[in-house]
Image: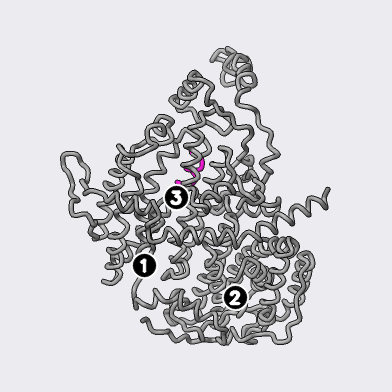
Amino acid sequence: MSEERTPLWEVFIRARQGLAHRHVGSVHAADATLALQAARDVYTRRGEGLSIWVVPSAAITASDPADRDELFEPTASKIYRHPTFYDIPDDVGHM
Amino acid sequence: MYTQGLVSIEGAGGAEEERFQARVDAEERIEPNDRMPEAYRRTLLRQISQHAHSEIVGMLPEGNWITRAPSLKRKAALLAKVQDEGGHGLYLYAAAETLGSSREEMVDALLEGRAKYSSIFNYPTRTWADIGAIGWLVDGAAIMNQIPLCRCSYGPYARAMIRICREESFHQRQGYEIMLTLCRGTEAQKAMAQDALDRWWWPCLMMFGPPDGESQHSDASARWKIKRFSNDGLRQKFIDATVPQAHYLGLAVPDPELRFDEASGHWHSGPIDWEEFRRVLAGGGVCNRDRLEARRRAHEEGAWVREAALAYAARQRRVAA
Amino acid sequence: MSATIPVAETPLVRFLLGRADDALILGHRLSEWTGHAPILEEELALANIGLDLIGQARALYAFAAEAEGAGHDEDDYAYLRDEGQFRNLLIAERPRGDFADTMVRQALYAIYAEMFWQAASQSTQRELAGFAAKAAKEMAYHVRHAGTWVVRLGDGTAESHARAQAALDRIAPYLDEMFDAEDPSLAGIVPDVPALRPGWDGAVRALLEEAKLSLPDVPFPQRGGRAGRHGETLGHLLATFQHLHRSHPGATW
């Protein structure tokens, strides 16, 4: 019974102008045109979007969770990148 | 959703399992490529795919009345509701796919009778009132089961459930409004509503699963924060919420032992016929055979469409290359 | 059983009922797919299209009710008219068939309906013009969706091509009726329907060319839907659609 698999696409939707596209889910479709239409029919039934991107799931390169420490932990010590690191007297006012 | 190289931590020793459990205990969400115990992955895959199958099979009993809905308003609402169920099945298949199965594999498992779906959909929808009863009771019970799943430890499942719960908020109201209209209508309509409640009440209580002591998967699921409340606890919550709604409709709940227990503040209900539950689960419901047949037919009759789309896409790729 | 209602059909009422019936009957045909579509994503798409059409029908029945002024509502028109009072085009009532029948019919009708509602958005009747502008947008998506599928079926596999061509052959006799003129007294309110034909021909030719399909010669075009002369399938559709409503006279749902 096993048949050829229909590719998976990730769906990104811009909810309104001024916002970035956000990942909302995925659809199966044989090609990009069908994927875009499926995304419209599945993910914008309640006025959720004004713009859609579909991306073949296979095209996504993801970081490995096992690399989390080496990729993301070193930034934790770079506290000088945050505004609260610097002492400015209250008298100066908002900065 | 993407999945690459699922990493199982089975056999990696107790320490890693402990670390996994600590993350779950800390309410950290587990995401697709994270290392996870194989049993956790299998449990989730089984539960999410069963949930997806239930949504898809669940389109059939209500679909049975779309062509006969008694007003255009009801027809549109029912079509939109059943469409939502298809969408929910789709979100759930996608969540399950992040665990390393394909939709095709899951669908095959359903069609070959290897996968389960909610037994409630093996009952027939005999009258229009069944559409009201399903929305009110079946969706009501489903929502009670599903709201805790929005906080499930597995991220993709939790996110799918959030979307589903948000969309489903109209389903139960739609059903209750149908019941209310029938109960305020003619004698025949009211009788139809009572008959539907009589037939759906007990199967709905069974939807929460076997009594806590007999449930197979409960312990591990609770530990992994896949399941956050016990079957009996959710069932009681449903009864407490639903009995007053039935009374508001002027309908009698078909349970001679039903009484409000002042001391506990809960409705006490009579024993559930678990023999019926097991029989329907095993294939003895009125519609088990028809439901699977309908799904198989749709799948088989649709094969040429899927093949055509893939063949066209392959040719376009070759032309572009 | 609820009795059939008499409708006082002025040309305007008749026109509105015709367009409403097109949308209702076609929407009903699409709703027959629920739970049985070949692809899960298409379940949702077919329901969206069906819901658009049922919505159009409801709006048009409301216009008809106002024009008739007899106190009828959308459900009276939908549920309490007999087959001979239905004014839909024959193309709308043809059976659901397979996915090729559904998509080919949908594309040919939607191309027509988009043009029709686009033209009707210039109607001298403001409410109708407003509705038409909205309906034209809905139909534009139906054209896109069904057209996408017609191309993939026509130019997919040998089987899908054969099915799509067979679907086209089956529906071809029902196309001419779409272009029959409306009552001349409605000029200005209703677009010049025959004038839509060249544009439709061009769009359909382009689509079928891309889909590697060809319109057959039609020696005997079928018409009569607008006059209430239907084929054998509408009666069955209405028997299903109306039976519950009619079984409870005067009931509210």
Q: Measure the alpha-carbon separation of dots 2 and 1.
A: 28 Å
For mark 2, what is the residue?
A: C92
Are the numbered discs 2 and 1 placed on the same chain, yes or no? no
- The answer to whether residue A57 shows anywhere in this view is yes
Residue holding disc 1: B127
Determine the residue positioned at 70% across, 64% down: C160
Q: Amino acid at mark 3?
A: Tyr
Q: As shown in the figure, which amino acid type bears the numbered disc 2?
A: Ala
Quarter location, residue C217: bottom right
Q: Nearer the viewer, residue C154 or C149?
A: C154
Residue B81, placed above or below residue B101: below
The chain holding disc 3 is B
* Above or below, C58 relative to B24: below
Per the rendered image, the range of residues in magenta is B158-167
Mark 3, other Cα within 10 Å: few <14 / some 14–19 / many ≥20 = many
**Regarding mark 2 in the picture, which secondary structure is present there?**
helix
| Residue B215 in the image, given as x and y percentages of width and height | 35, 39
Per the image, the residue denoted by label 3 is: B117
- Measuring from the top left, give residue A75's x and y in whole percent: 62, 18
